[in-house]
Amino acid sequence: MNENPPDERSWAIALLRDGFTRVHEGIEGLLAEADPRMLGFRTGPNSNSAAWLLWHLTRVQDDHFAHLVHALDPGSSTEQRWIEGDWVSRFDLPYSRLDTGYGHTSEQVAAIGMPGTGNLRGYHQDVHEETLKVLGSLSEADLGVVIDTHWDPAITVAMRLISVLEDTTSHLGQAEFLRGVYADLGH
C-alpha cells in the first residue's frame, strides 16, 4: 500500500484507479482458476457465459475510455485497444468490428464459445493498462467536463467513469456467480 496518500486534488481519481484495479484483480483471480468449459458454461439457453461476460465488460470499458479520451481531446489519436492491439483478429468473433455485446441475442452470446484464458486475460490487461494511463492523465477538474449531451442530465467524465466501474463490477460478479454454480454442479 502506498504510504503517501494522494493530495486532496486527486482523491477521486485515486479511488477510481483502485476500483478499476480491483476489477482487474478479480478477473485475474477468476481466470487463474478457469478452464474453457467453465468459461463457456451457461445456466440456460438464454443466459450469458463467463467468457462472454468478461469479454463484454472489457469491450465496454475499452469503448467508453476511448470515447472519453476523444471527448476531452478531439484531436487525440487514441484508439480502442480492441483495434489498436488487434484483439479483434485474435478473438476472431462473428460480431461487427466495434461490437461491445450490448443487446446480444442468445445466439450471439453462444458464438464466443469456450475460449482459453489467454485472450481474455491479455485483452483485459491491455485495457486495464490503458485505463490507468487515462486516469493518470485526468485532473480533478476534468471530472466535471460534460462529454455526452444525449442524456438529461448530460453525462460528465465522472458520471461515465462511475457508470463503467459499476458495469464492470456487476459483470465480474455475474461471472464469479457462474463459476460457483459450475463448481456446485460437480464440474
Image (spheres, rainbow, N blue to C red):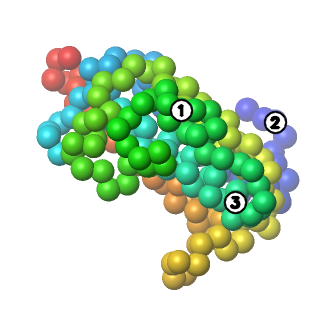
Q: CA distance from mark 3 to mark 2?
A: 34 Å
- The tag earlier along the polypeptide, 3 or 2, is 2
Q: Is residue 135 above or below residue 143?
A: above
Residue at the spot 66% in from the left edge and 47% down from the top edge: 79
**Labelled pair 3, 1 in contact (Cβ < 8 Å):** no
Query: Where in the figure is residue 76, as x and y percent of width and height?
Result: 76, 55
Q: CA distance from mark 2 to mark 1?
A: 37 Å
Q: Amino acid at mark 1?
A: Trp
Residue at the spot 60% in from the left edge and 72% down from the top edge: 148
Instruction: Say whether residue 15 is left or right of residue 121.
Output: right
Q: Amino acid at mark 2?
A: Glu
Q: Which mark is residue 3?
A: 2
Front-most of residues 131 and 101 = 101
Q: Amino acid at mark 3?
A: His
Q: Is residue 115 above or below residue 154?
A: above
Residue at the spot 17% in from the left edge and 36% down from the top edge: 43
Query: Where in the figure is residue 162, as x and y percent of width and height?
Result: 56, 59
From the viewer's perspective, is the residue at label 2 or at label 1 nearer? 1
Query: Where in the figure is residue 55, as x and y percent of width and height?
Result: 43, 38
Task: Indicate the secondary structure of the residue bearing disc 2.
Answer: loop
Instruction: Say whether residue 96 is left or right of residue 177.
Output: right
Query: Where in the figure is residue 158, as x and y percent of width and height?
Result: 64, 64
The quadrant of the rendering that contains the C terminus is top left
Task: Indicate the secondary structure of the residue bearing disc 1.
Answer: helix
Task: Indicate the secondary structure of the residue bearing disc 3.
Answer: helix
Q: Which mark is residue 70?
A: 3
**Labelled pair 2, 1 in contact (Cβ < 8 Å):** no
Q: Which residue is mark 1?
A: 87
Q: Is residue 17 visible?
A: no
